[in-house]
Image (tube, rainbow, N blue to C red):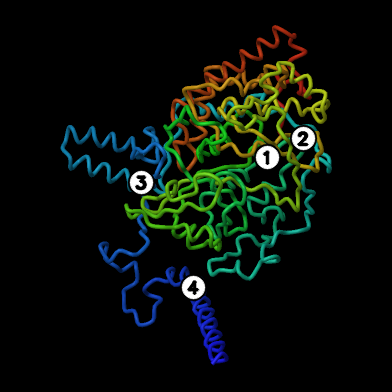
Amino acid sequence: MKMLLVRKFRVLILMVFLVACTMHIMIDLLPRLERRGPESRPGCSCPPPAAAPPRAAAPRWPSKHTLRILQDFSAEPASNLSSQSREAAAERAAGGAGGAGGGGAAAAAAGRARRLIGPGAPRPPPPAGNAAPLAALFEHPLYRAALPPLADGDLLFNVNSDIRFNPRAAEQPEWQNEDHHEEFLPTGETSIDSYPNWLKFHIGINRYELYSRHNPAIEALLQDLVSQKITSVAMKSGGTQLKLIMTFQNYGQALFKPMKQTREQETPPDFFYFSDYERHNAEIAAFHLDRILDFRRVPPVAGRLVNMTREIRDVTRDKKLWRTFFISPANNICFYGECSYYCSTEHALCGKPDQIEGSLAAFLPDLSLAKRKTWRNPWRRSYHKRKKAEWEVDPDYCEEVKQTPPYDSGTRILDIMDMTVFDFLMGNMDRHHYETFEKFGNETFIIHLDNGRGFGKYSHDELSILVPLNQCCRIRKSTYLRLQLLAKEEYKLSLLMKESLLKDKIAPILYQPHLEAMDRRLRIVLKAVSDCIEKDGYDNVVENDFNTDVNTVATER
């Protein structure tokens, strides 16, 4: 009797194990089964999707391609574009037409406006005038000063001109797909011409800059970020908010930050800087601001509309990400991923029905190829609700910093001042660490990464961001002269930023008050430098970093 019970118990355990295995297999196969269309199922006589009538049976995952509306945190049904956006402007125009000519005309105008929204929609033209201010700026002598001659040790990569890039040489079997083209194989011409644009960007990095002023690969890379086919998606580990790593058909990679707030929404006044939302449009605007300031220390960033179903859900192998997709009560596709903050169904990212807007920042070279060193920012905030950092209570804090390596020699303290000006113009309080390329030691620039918490408030100027400049009273001459230039009416910073940002595919990027706030903050920076000069003298404040007379037009190398 006892043996019979033991046998029955073993059979029961075996059956439970088999049921569990079967369920796991079904869960693994579910994504593949859902991706198959009706035409791929045996015995299905359904016509192909192209031949289906417009009002055919609705698929499980909606596939309309309109601009997404996110569930923001203000509890108001606002559009995901600002009131300055193309869609909002078109709808306002349609409303005006409706008042004069009836509701039917308004609806038709609104319909035409919505049909223009998409990845291939025409962009607004730059402002008319005698000459484009941005082009005139880049022709100014201050933007044509040559770099010091580059030795082999000043290049991040020493490229062998006899080697041609061939992605298939290291291709993994799972990367193969039927849409692969031989567009990156050698052409028989100069070998670098066969490289994808992300690789041209990488090999152009040197001791002084991430990219040169007129590198054509940068504009081409920005276009790649919005047009290349996305082949895989995974969540980025670490960080407080959701970010995705996207891989393209040409093997390049970019960091995707989805939209969380509308353009006109400000950070709530009761929010601490360390719990603020990261904004995709801040990442885009930071790249353009960095280039206008002639720092060139932000990796290329572009805005893109992504189809959440085809370009995220269907290509991800990250099961943790895939399992967070759901359909909202409004029949929109949503997901929330995994992160420290704002990754829950209450803070889900939702499309309308499946389009999501975000920023794509090109990856820097892999750490195995180009190591980077992470430094603690001397003016790092306390990241505490009650405690203050040392620099907030000690007015002589900079003197202590200047006696500590690497700030006691070289240009690092001037790099910190550049970063301070950059962050103040954006209103970015979240600069706790920064990175440099290890190969170049301490004599190199600071990489301006992770700018998502900029452009949060246009009605408030956070003067504490300027404390490093006020305490140290040091600035590069090149930076100071460019700031003075950008304060002039013919080179007004807000107008240059507006023109530059119009080139992005999801323009407008910044709400107009943010642009005006940059002009206001620029005047505050110049006043701070002026006060330092009055106190310590010009030569003790402004560091001459020009190799030649800035009044002569130097030819770019």
Q: Give the camera-side residue of 80 and 493.
A: 80
For marks 1 and 4 on the same chain, the one whose residue lies earlier in the sequence: 4
C-alpha separation, residue under disc 3 versus residue under disc 1:
34 Å
Rendered view: 356 above or below 312: above
* Label 1: how many Cα within 10 Å (few below 14, some 14–19, many 20+): many
**How far, Cα to Cα, is label 2 from label 4?**
50 Å
Q: Which residue is mark 4?
A: 29
Q: Earlier in the sequence, mark 2 or mark 3?
A: 3
Compared with residue 331, is residue 481 higher up or lower down, i.e. above or below?
above
Q: Position of residue 344 (x, y in %)?
A: 47, 50
Look at the picture and state if 290 lies above or below 187.
above
Vertical arrangement, residue 308 with respect to residue 340, above or below: below
Q: Quarter holding the C terminus? A: top right
Query: In front: 515, or 500?
Result: 515
Alpha carbon of mark 1 to alpha carbon of mark 4: how far? 45 Å
Observer able to see residue 484: yes
Which disc number belongs to residue 211?
A: 1
SS at circle 2:
loop
Discs 2/3, front: 2
- What is the spatial separation of the Cα atoms under label 2 and label 3, in whole angstroms? 45 Å
Q: Nearer the viewer, mark 2 or mark 4?
A: 4
